Amino acid sequence: MVKKDIIVIGSKGHKNAECFEWSDVIPYLGDYFYIILNLKSLIMRDDLQFYSEFSKKLDKIRSEINEIVWHKAKVFCITERFATCSKYAPQLSNYNWCPIGLNFKNERGSQFDRVIKEGYLSYVKEWSNFLDSESGVSDTYNLQKGDEVKTVCNNLLCNRADKPVAFSIEFREYELYPKRFHISNKILFLPQTTKIDISKGIDCLIEEILCIPKQEINLPSWTEKVQLVNEAELVKKIGESEDILKSTKENLEKYRKELDSLTRFKGLLTADGDTLVALIDEAFVLFGIKLEPVEGYKEDRIFSHKGDKIPIEVKGLKGSIPLKGGLQQLISRLDREDPRNYKAHGVLIGNHYKETPLDGKLNGRSVPFEPNVIEQAKSWKCCLISTLEIFEFVDKKLSGEDVNEEFRNRVFNTIGIGK
């Protein structure tokens, strides 16, 4: 952001902004992203020359603000007690630059609804007026946008009576034809800083706008021997907090890995292809069963045990697991000899209706295997099992149940679906 982006009217000497007094010729405000108006220095006088000059000047500012708040500009007003030129009509006040009429009440106080510890408002310890919420904001001037414009006021800081001493306003425009909705940038009204002078307060505001960090101070090592009150205690607390943070980060990483290892089994209900086969491998390992790949066939597996070789076919489909392209592929791989230790000659695993959502009780899908597939599986002595059923076994295993033998029997000693 360059210097040209900020203009200050009513205060000079701010290095990160272009500055003008109220008596100066004010440039076009559309050239700036941020406009700061210091009303403290706008002294209202009851003379014709002042009235004539400032009626035009404040009208010009109001007209330009009307235009630019709908684009990129943001306006900040350092407020002052409401004042007018009382001799002339129409009335000219120090708030005539504002696109709408504001009803301020000139009262003083030093109590607030809360304590602000950082930024511009932390330097405000007293207030000299507040927005009268009973009369509040009135649409005195016509905005240059839309068919219907409404004003929205947001309180930033209130006094003890809940009256806003710092607030922002924005305009919401509704166009009927074509139907559109726009929100303007904000105009912020901020009390004068009293803990520091107004000029330094404006510098603070500019730093907030530009997000300028506080300048770092590099201290030599010997200053560590010079102890301030509570310094040692704060150093100790920082060290303790860093230890807690390190331990927390380690635990967080550990728990995330455990969660990933756990939730990946949900892929049994959604995956197909290589991903599904990999999850089947991992699930079977949980039950002490190692499956072997078949060279050249990614979706095929072999279970080898005590001389038996039982082929396994894995399918993930959008519908039920079919005869053709499912069970028939498994049948083509069956060994001619019956297994000596198990009843099933082959196993067909299917993730059926893989894109159909399930509820918390795993309901919501149709049957995984149609009757003709079940009958053929029985005739060829093959086991049929869905990944949904395998998922239920995995859940039991992870919860601590000993279901290894039950799972092994379901997969290798069950013909058809076993029910």
Image: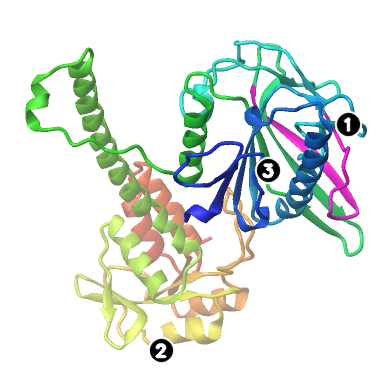
How far is mark 1 from mark 3, CA to CA?
A: 26 Å
Residue 19: % across, % down: 55, 44
When asked about the image quadrant of residue 367, the answer is bottom right
Residue type at mark 2 is Ser
Q: Give the mark, 3 or 2, whose residue is nearer the N terminus.
A: 3
Q: Position of residue 100 (x, y in %)?
A: 82, 38
Q: Which residue is drawn at 19% across and 70% down?
A: 306
Q: Are marks 1 and 3 in contact (CB under 8 Å)?
A: no
Residue at image location 41% in from the left, 53% down from the top: 263
Q: Does the magenta run of residues contain 169?
A: no
Mark 2 surroundings: few (<14), some (14-19) or many (≥20) residues within 10 A: few
Q: Magenta residues, as a range?
A: 137-157
- How far apart marks 3 and 2 lie (CA) works out to 74 Å
Mark 1 and mark 2 in contact (Cβ < 8 Å)?
no
- Label 3 residue SS: loop
Whether residue 328 sits left or right of residue 50 in the image: it is: left
> Which numbered dot is residue 186?
3
Amino acid of disc 1: Gln
* SS assignment at label 2: loop
The residues tagged by marks 2 and 1 sit, at their Cα atoms, a distance apart of 98 Å
Q: Name the residue under label 2.
A: 332
Reply above or below: 169 against 111.
below
**111 or 49, which is in the foreground?**
49
Dot 3 crowding, Cα within 10 Å, few <14, some 14–19, many 20+? many
Q: Which residue is drawn at 88% across and 46% down?
A: 142
Q: Residue at x 22, y 12 (%)?
A: 229
Magenta stretch encompasses residue 154: yes
Location of mark 1 (residue): 91
User: Which of labels 2 and 1 is toward the front?
Assistant: 1
Q: How many numbered discs?
A: 3
Q: Nearer the viewer, residue 251 or 214?
A: 214
